[in-house]
Image: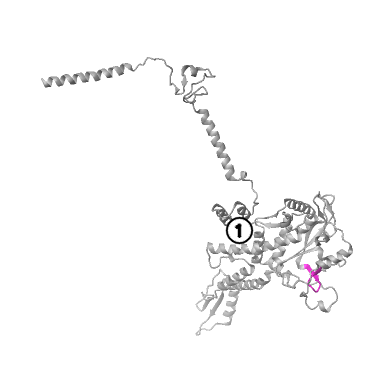
Amino acid sequence: MPIRDYLPFQRVDNDNNFSAKALDPEQVKGLSKAMKVASLALGFQGTNYYFNTRAIFERPTYDFERLMQAIDTDSYVKSAMSKYKDLFWKEGWEIVSENPEAVSYLAQRIDFMEIAMKRPFVDFLMEVSDQLFKYANAFIVKARGDLSDYFPDKLSPMTGDMPVVGYYLIPTEQVRIFRDKHNKPKSYRQQTDPLTYMPLEGNPVWTADKVIHLHLDRKTGRAFGTPFLINVLDDVIALRQIEEDIQNLVHRELFPLYKYKIGTAEQPAEPEEIQQAAIEIENLRAEGGLILPFRHDVEVIGSQGKSLDASGYLNHFKERVAIGLGVAPHHLGMSLNGGNRSVTERLDVALYDRIKQYQKLFSEMIRLNVFNELLFEGGFDPITNPLETGVSDRCYFKFKEIDVDTQVKKENHIVQKFINNLITLDEARLALGYDSDVDAKKTYASIQGDIQIDVAAGTAKAQAANTPPDPKTSDGQKSAPAGQRNLPSKKKGVGNAMRPMNQNGRKTSPDIKRFDNNFLSVIESLLDNEYTVVESDVTKENDNV
């Protein structure tokens, strides 16, 4: 018996009937042993695990509370996180699959989950991505409920429980994980603040099958992912310290120190004069002045152009903060060391590449942990090999291209390959992300060709209507071929009577003699010519005589 028959999934057969694969305890035990993933390596859990037999829920390796404080208080960190989030969801997303029925099913399930969660599904996904950017971890809990009275199709959960009706997040900074020695999570607990919750409520605990743990950059053997903000916190603190020092420097220069000199070597200062000068210094306003006698001299002690220029140090730490955040200085509104358009475009592309890497990981996480389970519940099988069945039920969470300029260049390059006969139409459409099956009659060239044909036919029809009849035809009757006589016309009319026609064509006019008013001028012209000739002959004879 194939191993697939042991899987406790409820599937849809060819007749759209659901069939449950019920397993007896022995089969379940055998299947568990056959599909158990062997793990010989031990996870990193510290020293408490080996000296304590009680369940130990591990704390995060990094201080997530400190990360939250840095994001909420520092403008550069906050701006970088907003930049990541905005670019991540800039062009939107879609669900793609070879099976359109699977896509329609997922869209319908998402609609029902939005009603149960009372929030848009994309808002939930944006919150998940926000947790991943901040903490490199996100903990999603599955909420289950009975949808049999509302959902139009039958749902069959994988584990025998009620189907998934929604998801909600656990605050990442409060999650504790309990694992076995082989690094496999057993349960998750939310460590709440005892000062804000009643002691009787306790801390909620979920088993591992109810929680989806998404993570980025998780080191081998560790339970939590590694936030990239950890590397930049010290640089942010150093930058803020330098900014405070520069602020103190500016404050000192704005309020200078007064050097009040009283008396000379010949005329030493009297005690009363010194006391009076101290009173005047205390009451001195920054925009005020002093009126002094001859023996008093006041000198203002300032930087006088010799103070420390800290701009180089400040720019250095700004660059360190920007690099640690994974963005360029101009992404944070900094204009350091100038730069031209070419440099900024390359830096933008580098940021896009980093965002695309996060999108790729996020898409695979959603496909594996969310879409696959929902598809199994609806009777679809996203694991079936498409090479054997021809069509796969697997659905992908696909982000649209965020770098529009690069996308246009790539698409133009593919079009040029097609125009130059390097690739076929099917290959070009697949490279552009379209279905290779296309109706040629609906393409632009086909539509334009049909329009031109219609225009040409209409023009020819209009010209035929406005063109006079062929002179070799008699009221619609064609003339006989050469060597044959014309048959009597079936269409008797004025044309045949006034302008008869034979195989040589139609006469331009009937054989009727008309009076021409111009014949007199013709006769006069001929007579003049004759008179000129006679006169010329007489002149020649007289000359001979």
Query: x and y percent of residue 192 in the render?
Result: 81, 67
The residue carrying mark 1 is: 403
Q: Secondary structure at mark 1?
A: loop
Q: Is residue 179 magenta?
A: yes
The picture places residue 373, in percent across and down from the top left corner, at 78, 58
The vertical placement of 486 against 392, above or below, is above
Residues in magenta, as a range: 174-186
Q: Residue furthest bottom?
A: 265
| Residue 149 visible in the snapshot | yes
Q: Is residue 28 left or right of residue 522?
A: right
Which image quadrant for residue 92? Answer: bottom right
Residue in front for this viewpoint, 219 or 258: 219
Residue 250 picture quarter: bottom right
**Left or right, 298 with reference to 154:** left
Position of the N terminus, as image quadrant, is bottom right
The residue most toward the right is 25
Q: Amino acid at mark 1?
A: Asp
Residue with the most extreme left position:
545
In magenta stretch: residue 330: no
The C terminus lies in which quarter of the figure?
top left
The residue closer to the viewer here, 255 or 475, is 475
